[in-house]
């Protein structure tokens, strides 16, 4: 039924995604610009007091030994729209090469050494690094420079100021991050890195403009967007390729309508083992990538605390650096005594609300059955509406509560903050997203409807994703872009078609922000709940027509507006869920997911280049809590699949005399498979051998160096005594 | 029924175990002894050729830069029995303090530094270590010295010799461990460390001679026997204390005969969670101990290969040292393509044999039923006899095959060799040991018999363990000891009652060897199979009398002869299995295990001090594969317990209408508990925070030192260029 249209739609959208997009113009150091390469833009509120601005700028420019950041900063000249309409408090920040190199040492960047190993960069030793040539002005990528500047701004901490000058109510205390306080009080609106036109052009060409299928240019992506983004695209590509075998095996099942559950069992077992294997191999893959990018060796314990982290100033017991300290026990108490019960309560509430909804539905249906008039017909819709509203409100509250709680837990590292936030939001979303499918599968036990639902979900999400994620925002952005060019043209003559820096910065400032991490929870829940209502309704009406698909497609649109890594990963996670949880019911799922991912690669790439502000690079060593989420999903998948197989009439036919036997067998095989999964996970090493050796070698060398150092110290001490 | 006798027997045995044992006499440097403190004894075959002895001694004495071990070695003088009866080729090995200190650096000993952290010992830096005073002749414990000498002897590798002088058939090649080759060819009979009388006296006093209950003197044990032994006793103590809550909760269940399965469910769930928690906490405990003993920071990758490891000589990619190399992929292939299928085949065979046995039993029984004569009555026993013989043979073959295969897998590290061997033997033993209990529980479904079996097993094993493990070997040894003293007295007058060194060494050489690791598989299987036969038989005869216990006690004696760490751990592992696997059937198990362990501590301590040769210390950082085995057991326990609960008539009564409902609920709760277990395991960090910080600090310091070192190198390079 769907076979032909999918491919058609797919091709059309592929072609669309590849269409030429207008390039964003890059800030160049023209006459009106500052005397340095602008890297990062800082936007303050337009009504910020002069003394606060002066104080902030002086702190940014101040020498490091005075507690400043020692960066270059200049106010942006007025744009074309005139002083009255635009914000005058836009600043571009840059730094000298020397400062950036010393910053690279501060943030603990790992670079390739002349002997091929990865080592922590040090200025004194810079000439021994592989790519360090001349003064080293090509050594750091722009993304790295921007990351360094972000780090320096973030770690600009209050000294003895009690409040921000001009704002007595904006309190400061020694060690508090200035930027964070200004941001939380609304004085600092945003700060973001600038795009780089030439690089972006080159990147987008190698990334998605050539038609031929090739691997993602991960190193280029990493060079431009940083490790976090590159790992996402690496994972997306890996995941797509890894699903191909499952897709290939699934096709004959679908084409020849093998309803034979024996064969489905084989297929499901293969799928489940395959899922485990690909997830384990991804860890190795990711470790290889992270090693070559130098983020694998960066140790969490040595990282500086994230800006939002607060506590009593003290000395870090590991590094000996002065930084805020916060007792771990207190954080654990907050997590286990407050956050965990809260999440469980919310899950319970959401389940409870769902149950009430089902009851109301039943009641409305019974009323309608008794007296089928127009008004009782309308009554049928009322539970759905109430439910949708309640869930929407709950979702909103949950989202803010999760953010608040995770902030309150006061994690020292950005990564652990992100992981805890993602985990909270993910659990809630998973619970709500798959509720409808679980309902169809286990309560309604309607496999045909389940298959239909999966097909619809996968096909519509594919189409609408491309549209809502990339095209719509892109068109909006292009309109803004054109308007700006038009305005500039009205005032000046633009020969080279390039926007001056001031306009370019303002244009980029208005682009949507691509959020690294989970600062926004998606609204999937709305869609899925509408789905449940709809299925309920359709069931009552006994309608199962292609019309269903259309309605759902519209519902789905709520799902697709992805605005950051969280949403991108969540999408993959849900797709993985569809493939693995119900693989024994709908073998074509893998095919659809592969097709979806192929277009996803292009649309995501396009989106990154043309729709969003450039994000700060994120030196990630792995995909964090998502690995865990995918693994948990693959475990749940084993249970679900065997439950589905056990429920199927074909399998039931094997045990005509005793249902107990059937269940016991199913449970036994399921336990066996689970055990096998865990053994497999245990046996496949997470880091490839050659990288383990390199890491061990670095550690060995370090310990030897430490021994030597202590020896030197000892011999010097002896000399002094003599 | 058993309540009073247990305690009585227990008290009697406790008192017995504490009885004064005659001290072993320590070698003292008297006039007939060598001019150095003898540490290790090397015994060569009495017919060893002179040239081989001369060559070996010269290699041991040779300078290190010539490839020698640079140790002191002397031939032991003749004993009292005269030249003709005793072996003249006994050598005592020692070393100068300087050599021992440089050896400590070679083996990578971690010691407490002056700032309280643990650091790798270096000679140049020796004065900065905490306990280093004067020349440092008290710095290393005797166990450490002996370990160093063992290491130096083990790593004495062939240079350009093609064979051992005098033995053209004993081939050597560059890099082959000389000691290992001599041992495998029977030229070297054994080498073992000597006891130290004064220390042993002090240790045994603080360990088991004082009556009052106190914690084990783990640091003293570690000082005398090394980390591996100390960890075993630490684990034994921890395990015993951890079981106390389970024992306390179990007592009322037993005393008041609560047959209520609701309560049993609560008890079982508590037990299962408690097992997980104690195993996780043990990891932390063990990490703390290992850190304070300096073995936690010793990295596997930096360890030198074990003597039996062979391969092409090359450079270790991590440490850069010259040593044999062997490709990991080849080892993996051997493990997965040969060893794993072999183990599975053996398990299958053992199952198959068991099935045949049951069939034969059934056949014999039917013949007897048809025609109950004397001859058919004898026929009843024939299947059991055949089965026992077959199993005995299989066990023997398996044991040798496992050792051969693990040797053939060619593991680089002693620890990984041990882990693979233990795992192989353990799986087979587990399979065979618990088969009878599983048979009673799930095939016979006879809970009363199961309870009785557990009680018998636990009580008899306790009594017989003490007897067979400690007293019997001790009496044998004492007889030998007295005989020797008697002989010496006949020739000379012994004023101080101390044996001269030569006699002492010969006496110790004849003591049993305490095997560190799994070089001997126990014969448990025999016992357990006899148990199955017996239960079958008793069932046929409908006999269930106290007589059963007596018969079993005799069978059990085969189980108890523990000769090394493997057997000691295996005993604990089986006890843990009895407690956790069937906790919902026999709540008193924990009480019996606690009592057993209390006496076990004493008898093991006694055995270590007086029955066995002193073992070489084993710098273990954890209990290795046993941790995994205990964890696997606790997972299996969840499944078993829920199966037992699901089978109980009381629980069945809750679901009178539908067995399916019962099973589904049981499975659901079991899955929930398994998930909870895994989450718990994941959440509890394996290493306590303060040790994590110390480790991270060491790593940070090391990396900083490496940076500095590279900087210095760079600046020197710059100077040289200028």
Image (cartoon, coloured by chain):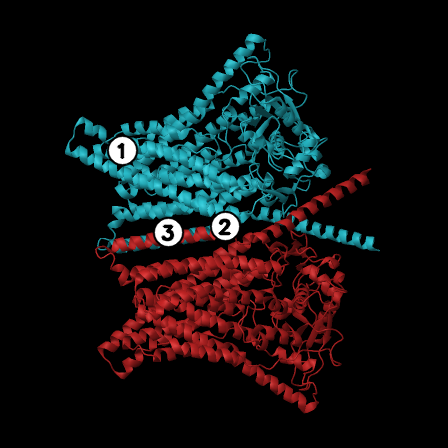
Chain colours: A cyan, B red
CB contact under 8 Å: marks 3 and 2: no
Chain assignment, label 3: B
Q: Report helix, strand or loop for mark 1.
A: helix
Instruction: Provide residue A116's location: percent of width, then percent of height.
Output: 65, 41
Instruction: Provide residue B560's location: percent of width, then percent of height.
Output: 47, 74
Rendered view: A62 above or below B689? above
CB contact under 8 Å: marks 1 and 3: no
Nearer to the camera, B158 or B562: B562
Chain assignment, label 1: A
Rendered view: A320 above or below A484? below
Q: Separation of disc 1 and disc 2 at Cα?
A: 50 Å
Q: Which residue is mark 1?
A: A383
Q: Which residue is mark 2?
A: A684
**Which mark is drawn over residue B393?**
none
Q: Which residue is mark 3?
A: B672
Q: Report helix, strand or loop for mark 3.
A: helix
Total numbered circles: 3
Q: Are marks 1 and 2 on the same chain?
A: yes
């Amino acid at each position: 039924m769907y076979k032909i249209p999918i491919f058609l739609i797919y091709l059309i959208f592929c072609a669309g995604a590849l269409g030429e997009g207008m390039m964003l113009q890059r800030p160049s150091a023209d006459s009106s610009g500052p005397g340095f390469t602008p890297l990062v833009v800082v936007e303050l509120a337009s009504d910020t007091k002069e003394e606060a601005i002066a104080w902030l700028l002086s702190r940014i420019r101040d020498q490091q030994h005075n507690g400043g950041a020692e960066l270059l900063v200049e106010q942006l000249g007025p744009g074309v729209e005139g002083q009255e309409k635009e914000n005058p408090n836009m600043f571009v920040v840059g730094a000298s090469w020397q400062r950036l190199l010393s910053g690279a040492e501060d943030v603990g960047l790992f670079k390739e050494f002349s002997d091929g190993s990865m080592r922590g960069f040090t200025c004194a030793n810079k000439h021994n690094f592989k790519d360090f040539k001349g003064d080293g002005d090509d050594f750091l990528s722009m993304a790295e420079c921007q990351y360094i500047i972000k780090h320096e701004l973030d770690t600009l901490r209050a000294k003895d100021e009690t409040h921000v000058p001009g704002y007595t109510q904006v309190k400061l205390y020694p060690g508090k991050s200035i930027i964070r306080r200004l941001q939380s009080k609304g004085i600092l609106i945003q700060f973001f890195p600038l795009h780089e036109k030439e690089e972006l052009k080159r990147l987008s060409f190698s990334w998605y403009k050539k038609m031929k299928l090739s691997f993602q240019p991960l190193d280029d992506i990493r060079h431009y967007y940083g490790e976090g983004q590159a790992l996402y695209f690496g994972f997306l590509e890996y995941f797509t390729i890894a699903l191909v075998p499952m897709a290939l095996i699934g096709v004959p099942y679908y084409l020849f309508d093998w309803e034979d559950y024996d064969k489905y069992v084989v297929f499901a077992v293969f799928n489940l083992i395959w899922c485990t294997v690909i997830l384990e191999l991804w860890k190795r893959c990711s470790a290889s990538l992270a090693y070559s990018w130098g983020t694998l060796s960066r140790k969490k314990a040595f990282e500086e605390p994230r800006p939002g982290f607060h506590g009593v100033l003290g000395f870090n017991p590991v590094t000996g650096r002065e930084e805020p300290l916060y007792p771990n026990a207190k954080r654990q108490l907050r997590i286990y005594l407050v956050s965990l019960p809260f999440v469980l309560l919310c899950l319970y509430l959401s389940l409870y609300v769902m149950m009430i909804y089902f009851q109301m539905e039943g009641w409305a249906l019974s009323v309608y059955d008794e007296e089928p008039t127009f008004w009782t017909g309308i009554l049928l819709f009322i539970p759905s509406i109430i439910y949708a509203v309640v869930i929407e409100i709950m979702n909103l509250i949950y989202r803010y509560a999760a953010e608040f709680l995770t902030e309150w837990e006061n994690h020292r590292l950005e990564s652990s903050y992100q992981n805890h936030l993602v985990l909270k939001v993910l659990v809630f979303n998973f619970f709500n997203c798959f509720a409808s499918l679980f309902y169809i599968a286990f309560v309604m036990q309607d496999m045909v409807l389940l298959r239909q639902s999966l097909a619809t979900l996968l096909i519509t999400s594919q189409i609408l994703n491309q549209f809502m994620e990339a095209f719509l925002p892109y068109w909006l952005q292009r309109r803004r872009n054109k308007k700006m060019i038009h305005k500039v043209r009205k005032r000046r003559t633009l020969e080279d078609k390039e926007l001056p820096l001031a306009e370019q910065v303002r244009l980029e400032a208005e682009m949507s922000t691509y959020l690294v991490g989970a600062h926004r929870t998606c609204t999937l829940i709305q869609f899925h709940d509408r789905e449940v209502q709809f299925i309920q309704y359709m069931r009552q009406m006994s309608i199962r027509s292609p019309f269903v698909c259309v309605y759902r497609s519209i519902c789905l649109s709520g799902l697709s507006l992805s605005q950051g890594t969280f949403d991108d990963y969540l999408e993959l996670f849900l797709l993985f869920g569809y493939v693995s949880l119900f693989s024994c019911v709908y073998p074509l799922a893998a095919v659809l997911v592969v097709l979806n991912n192929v277009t996803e690669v292009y649309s995501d790439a396009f989106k990154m280049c043309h729709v969003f502000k450039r994000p700060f690079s994120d030196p990630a060593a792995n995909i964090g809590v998502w690995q865990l989420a995918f693994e948990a999903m693959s475990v749940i998948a084993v249970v679900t699949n065997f439950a589905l197989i056990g429920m199927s009439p074909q399998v039931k036919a094997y045990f005509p005399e005793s249902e107990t036997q059937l269940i016991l067998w199913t449970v036994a095989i399921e336990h066996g498979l689970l055990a096998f999964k865990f053994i497999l996970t245990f046996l496949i090493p997470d880091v490839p051998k050659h990288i383990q050796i390199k890491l061990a070698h670095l550690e060995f060398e370090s310990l030897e160096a430490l021994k030597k150092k202590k020896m030197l110290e000892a011999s010097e001490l002896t000399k002094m005594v003599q």
